[in-house]
Image: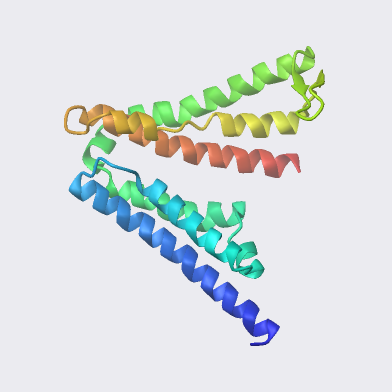
């Protein structure tokens, strides 16, 4: 094959692999929820498959396909994340979610903004007092760490996103349906608000 045909083939294979992994994630989540499997999570299975695919292509010296499979934040935000959120929303118990909708919005939206402004304010205050230090991993020398306002806001927009997978795994839906719905709903809305905050800060600081 010519170079153009090879590039087109790699793009097609990369798109099929990404679509297949997204489809596997959604189907595995449905199967785990249906059969109440207590071992593993659909995200862990998808990560393992991605690692095996990347390792096989890297071992085969397929540089073009390896470049296509590298992480791209735009692809993640606009193509990968919506199906993941859709699968989570489709598999959840919607009755209890909307029953506790006010609590979910309180913790997921208002709580995220409170955490973002609190983290940003405290970090900016410490940065103005020159209380933050950094260490050079090679030399072991300490030096003062000075961050710009843009860097602080971007960092805090990521820090205010909480991971609820561990919390949800410890809560039994049969015993605590309302608590499960609140924690699960807060995790979904918290991630969405954090992504919006990050993109907003990134756009307005550019």
How many numbered marks are there?
A: 0
* Image x and y of residue 143, in percent: 82, 20
Residue reaching furthest to the left: 174
Can you see residue 101? Answer: no
Q: Nearer the viewer, residue 192 or 21?
A: 21
Coordinates of residue 151 in the picture (x, y in percent): 72, 32
- Please report the residue visible at 52 percent of the width from the left and 69 percent of the height from the top: 15
- In the image, 23: left or right of 50? left
Q: Is residue 64 left or right of residue 87?
A: right
Residue plotted at (79% across, 30% down): 138
Furthest residue in direction bottom, as rendered? 1
How far from the left and from the top, in percent, is residue 186? Answer: 39, 32
Q: Nearer the viewer, residue 178 or 24?
A: 24
Q: Which quarter of the picture shows residue 124? A: top right
Q: Is residue 78 visible?
A: yes
Q: Residue at x 37, y 52 (%)?
A: 86
Spot occupied by residue 160 in the image (x, y as percentages of width and height): 54, 29
Q: What colour scheme governs how the chains and residues are painted in the rendered image of this protein? A: rainbow
In the image, is residue 27 above or below residue 40? below
Question: In the picture shown, does residue 130 fall above or below 196?
Answer: above
Quick check: 122 left or right of 107? right
Q: Quadrant of the C terminus?
A: top right
Name the image quarter holding the N terminus.
Answer: bottom right
Q: Residue 101 sits in which quadrant? A: top left
Residue, far front: 59
For the residue pair 62 and 160, the one nearer the viewer reads as 62
108 to the left or right of 197: left
Which picture quadrant has residue 92?
Answer: top left
Residue in the image at 51% along x and 32% along y? 161
């Amino acid at each position: 094959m010519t170079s153009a045909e090879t590039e087109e083939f790699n793009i097609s294979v990369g798109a099929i692999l990404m679509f297949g992994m997204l489809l596997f994630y959604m189907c595995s989540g449905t199967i785990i929820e249906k059969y109440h499997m207590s071992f593993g999570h659909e995200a862990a299975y998808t990560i393992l498959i991605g690692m095996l695919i990347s390792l096989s292509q890297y071992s085969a010296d397929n540089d073009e396909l390896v470049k296509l499979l590298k992480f791209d934040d735009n692809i993640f935000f606009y193509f990968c994340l919506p199906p993941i959120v859709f699968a989570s929303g489709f598999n959840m118990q919607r009755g209890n979610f909307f029953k506790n909708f006010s609590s979910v919005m309180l913790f997921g939206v208002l709580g995220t903004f409170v955490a973002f402004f609190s983290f940003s304010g405290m970090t900016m205050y410490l940065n103005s007092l020159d209380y933050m230090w950094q260490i050079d991993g090679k030399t072991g020398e300490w030096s003062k760490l000075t961050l710009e306002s843009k860097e602080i806001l971007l960092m805090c927009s990521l820090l205010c996103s909480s991971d609820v997978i561990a919390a949800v795994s410890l809560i039994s839906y049969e015993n605590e349906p309302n608590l499960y719905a609140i924690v699960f709903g807060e995790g979904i809305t918290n991630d969405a608000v954090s992504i919006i905050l990050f993109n907003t800060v990134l756009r307005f600081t550019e």
